[in-house]
Amino acid sequence: MPDWLTTVSHVSLLVAGLCAAWIALDCRRRPQPMSIMAAVWPLSALFGSVIVLWFYLRHGRAGAGRGRAHGAPPFPVAVAKGALHCGSGCTLGDIIAEALALIAPGVLVPLGWPGVWPEPMFAVWVLDFLFAFAIGIVFQYFAIAPMRGLGVIDGLKAALKADTLSLIAWQVGMYGAMAIAVFAIFRPMYGASPDATSAVFWFVMQWAMIAGFLTAYPMNWWLIRIGIKERM
């Protein structure tokens, strides 16, 4: 990878990490009305960086005593929050899956590599999806169950219904962006693609997550509009 790209990647990751750390600390000082959002906001900042920080300050920061600093948000803002809620689970799932595949690549064998997929990247994507899906359902449960007063079983059913299509839409955008980066940019230009040990990989992942947000936003709009997903 060229030196300039490595430098840009490190700077981007550092800024995003600082934004995430600041939001996490601020959420401790100003507890969120919906407790799961204390994880959603900093995780979203890991890819959204200063844009998510601005959005949090404008539309997500709680007032004193677990109160809201703002009134009911406009519908497009509520949709963005719903998409970030989905994306935060994807972010955490992808980080765990990529680290696991790096530390123990044998986990990719039952997921199709090398027997089914010639590229280990595709097996990693399967692992990413499994972790993202599981964590996304948990995140969605802790959003929907308290708002609707549901028990564990009913809450998990509602979470599954609310998050499945949203997560799939997010992963389509994320995987599409990563595929373009790998097969249309890095390999043709540099003859190789970055892996999870490289800052460039995680910089590209930031952009892929943003692509995931863009593809998940219309799906969240529809899910919230018809009442399957709660408005945040």
Image (spheres, rainbow, N blue to C red):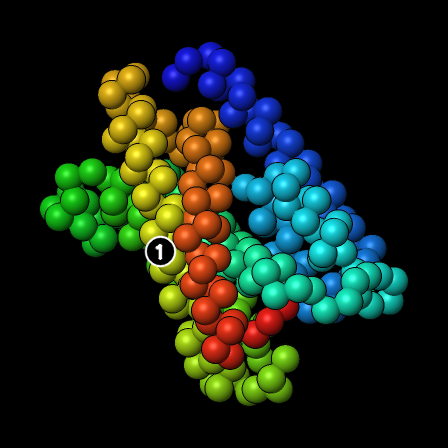
The image position of residue 123, as x and y in percent, is 25, 47
The image position of residue 202, as x and y in percent, is 46, 34
From what the image shows, is residue 2 above or below residue 40?
A: above
**Residue nearest the viewer, comparing 144 with 152:** 144
Residue at position x 38%, y 66% in the image: 165
Q: Quadrant of the C terminus?
A: bottom right
Q: In the structure shown, which secondary structural element does the residue marked by tag 1 occupy? A: helix
From what the image shows, is residue 70 above or below residue 193?
A: below
Quadrant for residue 186, please give it. Answer: top left
Quadrant for residue 78, please give it. Answer: bottom right
Specify few, some or many for label 1: CA neighbours under 10 Å numbering under 14, 14-19, or 20 or more. Answer: many
Furthest toward the left, the residue is 115
**Residue nearest the viewer, comparing 111 with 39:** 39
- Label 1 is placed on what type of residue? Phe
From what the image shows, is residue 120 above or below residue 134?
A: above
Residue at position x 64%, y 32% in the image: 15
Residue labelled with disc 1: 129
**Residue nearest the viewer, comparing 91 with 175:** 175
From what the image shows, is residue 112 above or below residue 153?
A: above
Furthest toward the right, the residue is 64
Is residue 138 among the parts visible in the rendering?
no
